[in-house]
Image (spheres, grey):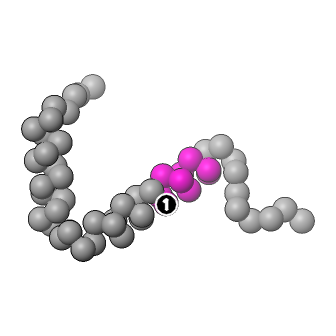
Amino acid sequence: MFRLGPWEIVLIVAVVIIIFGPKRLPELGRGIGQFFKNFKNSIKGDHDDPKP
C-alpha cells in the first residue's frame, strides 16, 4: 500500500481545483458521494425501489 502525506494531499486538491474550478467542486463532491452511497447499497443488497 501507499501512504499520502500532507504535501501530496495538498497537491492533489490543488490539481482538482485547477481542473474543475471552485464552482464545480460542490457538484463533484455530491456526485462522488452519491456514487459511493449507491455502490455501498448495491454491495449490501439494499435497494431504493419498493418491493411488491
x and y percentages locating residue 1 in the rendered image? 27, 25
Quadrant of res 19: bottom left
Residue, x 18% and y 70% (percent of image)? 21
Q: Give the residue displayed 56% in from the left and 56% down from the top.
A: 38
Q: Residues within 10 Å of mark 1 (few under 14, many from 20)?
A: few
Q: Image quadrant for the C terminus?
A: bottom right
Mark 1 residue element: helix
Residue occupying image coordinates x 36% and y 70%: 27
Residue at 42 percent of width and 64 percent of height = 31
The image quarter containing residue 8 is top left
Please identify the quarter of the rendering in which residue 16 is found.
Answer: bottom left
Locate residue 48 relative to residue 31 in the image: left or right: right
Q: Is residue 8 left or right of residue 25?
A: left
Count of numbered labels shown in the rendering: 1
The magenta segment is 34-42
At which x and y percent is residue 6? 15, 35
Q: Is residue 23 magenta?
A: no
Please give the residue where the numbered disc 1 appears in the rendered image.
Answer: 34
Mark 1 is on which residue type? Gln
- Residue nearer the viewer, 9 or 36: 9
Residue 23 coordinates in the image, percent (x, y): 24, 74
- The secondary structure that dominates the magenta segment is helix
